[in-house]
Amino acid sequence: MSKLVIVGTVAFDAIETPFGKTDKILGGAATFIGLAASQFKVDASIVSVVGGDFPQEYLDLLSDRNVDISGVEIVKDGKTFFWSGRYHNDMNSRDTLITELNTLADFNPVVPKNYKDAEIVMLGNLHPLVQASVLDQMTNKPKLAILDTMNFWMDSALEDLHNVIKRVDVITINDEEARQLTGEYSLVMAAKKIHEMGPKYVVIKKGEHGALLFNDDNVFYAPALPLKEVFDPTGAGDTFAGGFAGYIARTGDISFENMKNAVIYGSTLASFCVEKFGTERMQNLGTSEIQQRLKQFKNLTQFDIQLN
Amino acid sequence: MSKLVIVGTVAFDAIETPFGKTDKILGGAATFIGLAASQFKVDASIVSVVGGDFPQEYLDLLSDRNVDISGVEIVKDGKTFFWSGRYHNDMNSRDTLITELNTLADFNPVVPKNYKDAEIVMLGNLHPLVQASVLDQMTNKPKLAILDTMNFWMDSALEDLHNVIKRVDVITINDEEARQLTGEYSLVMAAKKIHEMGPKYVVIKKGEHGALLFNDDNVFYAPALPLKEVFDPTGAGDTFAGGFAGYIARTGDISFENMKNAVIYGSTLASFCVEKFGTERMQNLGTSEIQQRLKQFKNLTQFDIQLN
């Protein structure tokens, strides 16, 4: 089992969907990543920042699941990062209503001493300079560094983004962002160009259409489980990344074959995440449910054609 | 091996894509379906109509592949159905530039005597009354009747469409059309509503995102092969349907497990279809190429997670 360092936001979210709306609830990329990774009972540590307004119970929720939070800085007189958004009827697009950076504006990540030698590093969506700073603090080159990012950084910090992309092994990115980053419409061509930017493995997330894993000429396609209803997509991408990173940390195996499994685990956990608001479903998720859903994924994709 | 009756257009197409444009070339739903089904060396017959302007060599092309064309009526002093369209840069949407119904306007399908007892019937995209007329002519209830349709008939002949949907076992339809037909955004819910309209099996085609096969609570997901370049999507849906129907006719097995294979064969053949203009790629397609690509589909989707 490998140690896992996670950097990303720990935050408040307020969410509106066609099904309802929430007050300020627990959110943030690192939160979703940590909750997903904790399913694999790995030794994970979150590096983040919150304000004095952040409830202790939210932090307990992570540490109760053996996620180390010694790297979550608490700025007593500061306020926690707050995001509010409204999903459209198709649940695939959303409007950001509020973004208050608060303590995140001056965030200087500090990797806890015990985790500076972690083999797996998961750089959740944040400013690329913050992501790079975490890599700088690692004493050994990680066995696998995984980066998640979004179009916001392509628009506002493209050079910094390229510099950190260069340094990671895996990137997870959604389809439209892959197209924006490369100028290629074909995802095969986009993945090829991203390979050339550095990462050996490119994971393209396609929301309800699943995810693609590329490595040179190898491709693997994990569908999303077709759901009767997507209740709240918030955190699905982070949960996917957390499941991916957690499974890799658990197994310590970074072969392409094993990454296929990691992608399936990521998709499986993401399929739970969207069933309730925020982290609610991820807080109450048992091993047998996960096994049951993995079986659904097998039935969904496995076929038996004998080849000559 | 079962006999297969195919009804649909045999036509001229003129296509513009970002990669180029064609003059009037061979097209039509039944043409693509027939070419795909012929890969399975089944006893297939096309029921359609063309004008005196239709080249003999196009008809020979089908009969050379053992597709019976005795049910293709030739209206000597009529003109063949002609469609022209232009694809947008994303290749997922297109504008229709010209539709000349010509002989199709008065088409009265006549199923050849030898094929009135066919076990498998593939109703390609056409007016639902024409599709129903083919079912009326079958002497026995087919083992499997498959229907393909499109939004055009939902807009212009919804009641007739419902009447023929009621009579078939399988429907193939694209995602937007499934949503239009049912008013449900979730494809799981849409498939459920379509089940209630009659068909036990619902295949929802999602273009570059693959296809879903639903049967009660069973779901199967066949991805589309990620391609460097989609050259011309014309006929991909018909090729998918033809591969599906051809494989079922070949095996005579209408179990859900075997339909999974049929969907994979359909996706495999469609992945070739889009590589060149019109039917060009389907005219020159060898068994070993298909086997090779099926292997790619296996690698694309198969994973090895041991479940408890």
Image (tube, coloured by chain):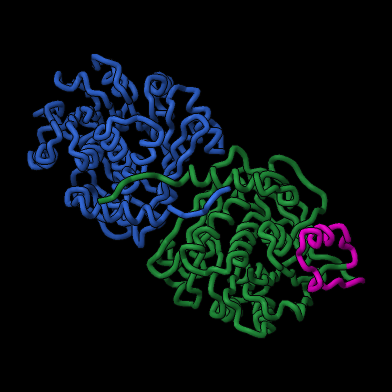
Chain colours: A blue, B green
Q: Is residue A250 left or right of residue B170?
A: left
Quadrant in the rendering for residue A28 = top left
Query: Measured from the top left, where is residue A50 in percent x and y?
Result: 16, 32
Q: Is residue B245 magenta?
A: no
Query: Measured from the top left, where is residue B285 in percent x and y?
Result: 71, 48
Pick out the residue farthest to the front: A308
Q: Which is more toward the observer, A47 or A265?
A: A265
Residue at the (26%, 24%) spot, across then down: A119
Q: Is residue B175 left or right of residue A86?
A: right
Q: With respect to residue B100, does A282 lie above or below?
A: above
Residue at the (13%, 31%) spot, across then down: A69
| Residue B151 showing in the rendered view | no
Q: Which is more toward the observer, B187 or B252?
A: B252
Q: With respect to residue B58, does B110 lie above or below?
A: below
| Residue A68 showing in the rendered view | yes
Q: Which residues are magenta?
A: B52-77
Q: Which is more toward the observer, B260 or A179?
A: B260
Q: Which is more toward the observer, B27 or B295?
A: B295
**Which quarter of the image is occupied by the N terminus of chain B?**
bottom right
Q: With respect to residue B97, does A129 lie above or below?
A: above
Residue at the (40%, 27%) spot, across then down: A156
Q: Is residue B115 left or right of residue A294?
A: right
Residue at the (89%, 63%) spot, across then down: B53
Query: Measured from the top left, where is residue B28 in percent x and y?
Result: 73, 61
Q: Is residue B73 magenta?
A: yes
Pick out the residue farthest to the right: B77
Query: Measured from the top left, where is residue B64 in percent x and y?
Result: 81, 59
